[in-house]
Amino acid sequence: MADWDGLRSRLEQCDQSHLLQYLDKLTPEQADKLYLDLNGIDFEKANQYFQKCNVNNQTCEKKDSCLEPLEKDSIGSTTRDAAKLVDWERIGMTQISEGKVACLLLAGGQGTRLGVNYPKGMYNVGLLSHKSLYQLQAERIVKLQQLACKQCGGDKAVIPWYIMTSEHTKEQTVQFFSDHAYFGLHKDNIMIFEQNTLPCLDFNGKILLDQSYRVARSPDGNGGVYAALHQSGILDDMKRRGVTLVHVYGVDNILVKMADPVFTGFCVEKGADCCAKVVKKTYPTEPVGLLCKCEGKYQVVEYSEISMETASKRTPDGNLVFNAGNICIHLFAVDFLQSVCCSHEHELIHHVAKKKIPYMVDGTRVVPQSANGIKLEKFVFDAFQFSKSFAALEVLREDEFSPLKNGPGADRDCPHTSRAALCDLHYRQIMKAGGRFLDDEDTELPLIPRRRQSVATSQGLCEVSPLVSYCGEGLEELCAGKRFKFPLHLSTDEKETQQPPMKKHCLDTN
């Protein structure tokens, strides 16, 4: 039975009594919903979070005085350390073949900025195959499991896939995977769980109502993964399966290498409990988080927290001193995750995101035209500070990082740039394997230098199914000595999962 008097008392003590302003106008069913919603909120904590964030007096305090670049011995590079790649891959494949490696996808975000009302992982950027981000990632896992079994033997090369959704994306994600037969993976090896939510607040710390009987809420950020891992039993599942290393990544990177064996081998060789992939910043003010040390602890610092003078500092060879751009691809030891989840999660701070949040005014739901409140989020990388053995691997941006954040027509990080990045990567892989491309006049095309005009823009689409090649391996037999024309889609003889008919690729096998 609802204890309205007790709830009113709690709300009065925390100065949130306005949440009952529409109670007299609610139906009994709506009143029950409101009671359940409010009764599950810790109002004291919500007030504490707001006070700690100090929203109305925020200043962009520069952190220059406490910053240090990463130590050279903690950083590897896929270019400078090219001679080590084979060994790192061998170590990583062994770990995968023994069932010790899992993937953890941070997929709580909706496709709002893309202009769609479904989870971002379901988005199709316009590839020839029409595959979604989820399907590309699933098929990379399928292929990598096959490679690990082939190279190392045994039958334990299963890569469990843990997918953290939000209350807004879970149901659709579960249904999407079910509708597509889990894209060739075994259902029991895909675990979908939900992160927590937090009430949205106005700039005075008052909790907002989305409806007269429902509080406005938002996911607690990708850093909410630590609480969710513990609460959902996912950590226990990892340990039961014998997983010791977990690749953590964001859903929107079309180039992500699932459970990358090279990255895995690098981290194992370093004996690291926490690793991150980074790319070189292209210019001092590039809006990406900077991985560095701050007051002796590993941290990702926002570009706005560094002065132009510090951001522009360069080494004698011309590189930026602070140039390790964070791309949200991490590898954590399960023991490290256990420590963060059970001992340090409460130490992670909330970050403020000022947003346009629909709210109730005089009984009417209003959609604001400018920011009217805040959402509180934790960040996954804030746990780096607890690492006892940290390492970072610098990778080529054009090979591993192309995020999808903005809708069609945007200048960057949009469907066009994501599609172009994948097509260019596959173009280079085919060329490296001995294949050649012809333009419409049958003139042979050169290997396009990096950072020039995209082949997808200047010529046409080029796609290699993940079921054919995980990251360029095995293409020699299909491509060496052959000439291709656009559009090109290299796929297996197996039926592509739930795909409409595609235009057959053109190739010259003479």
Image: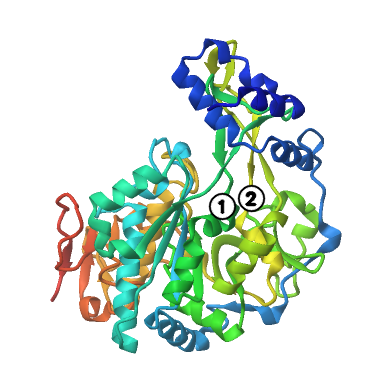
Q: Residue furthest front?
A: 1
- Judge whether residue 333 can be spotted in this image: no
Residue at 42% across, 74% down: 241
In the rendered image, the vertical position of residue 480 relative to residue 35, given as above or below: below
Q: Nearer the viewer, residue 257 or 362?
A: 362
Label 2 and label 1: CA atoms lie apart by: 6 Å
Q: Residue 436 in the image: x percent, y percent? A: 27, 72
In the rendered image, the vertical position of residue 219 relative to residue 362, given as above or below: below
Q: Nearer the viewer, residue 324 or 195?
A: 195
Q: Nearer the viewer, residue 488 or 363?
A: 363
**Which of the numbered marks, if any, corresponds to residue 378?**
2
In the image, 361: left or right of 442? right
Q: How busy is the neighbourhood of tag 2: few (under 14 within 10 Å), some, or many (20 plus)?
A: many
Q: Residue 103 in the image: x percent, y percent? A: 44, 66
> Helix, strand or loop at disc 1?
helix
In the rendered image, the vertical position of residue 405 relative to residue 163, given as above or below: above
Q: Residue 396 in the image: x percent, y percent? A: 52, 69
Q: How is the image coloured?
A: rainbow
Q: Quadrant of the C terminus?
A: bottom left
Label 1 sits on what residue type? Asn
**Which of the numbered marks, if any, corresponds to residue 495?**
none
> Helix, strand or loop at disc 2?
loop
Q: Residue 198 in the image: x percent, y percent? A: 60, 39
Q: Are marks 2 and 1 in contact (CB under 8 Å)?
A: yes
Residue at 51% across, 20% down: 31
**Which of the numbered marks, if any, corresponds to residue 222?**
1
Label 2 sits on what residue type? Lys
Task: Report the number of numbered marks.
Answer: 2
First along the sequence among labels 2 and 1: 1
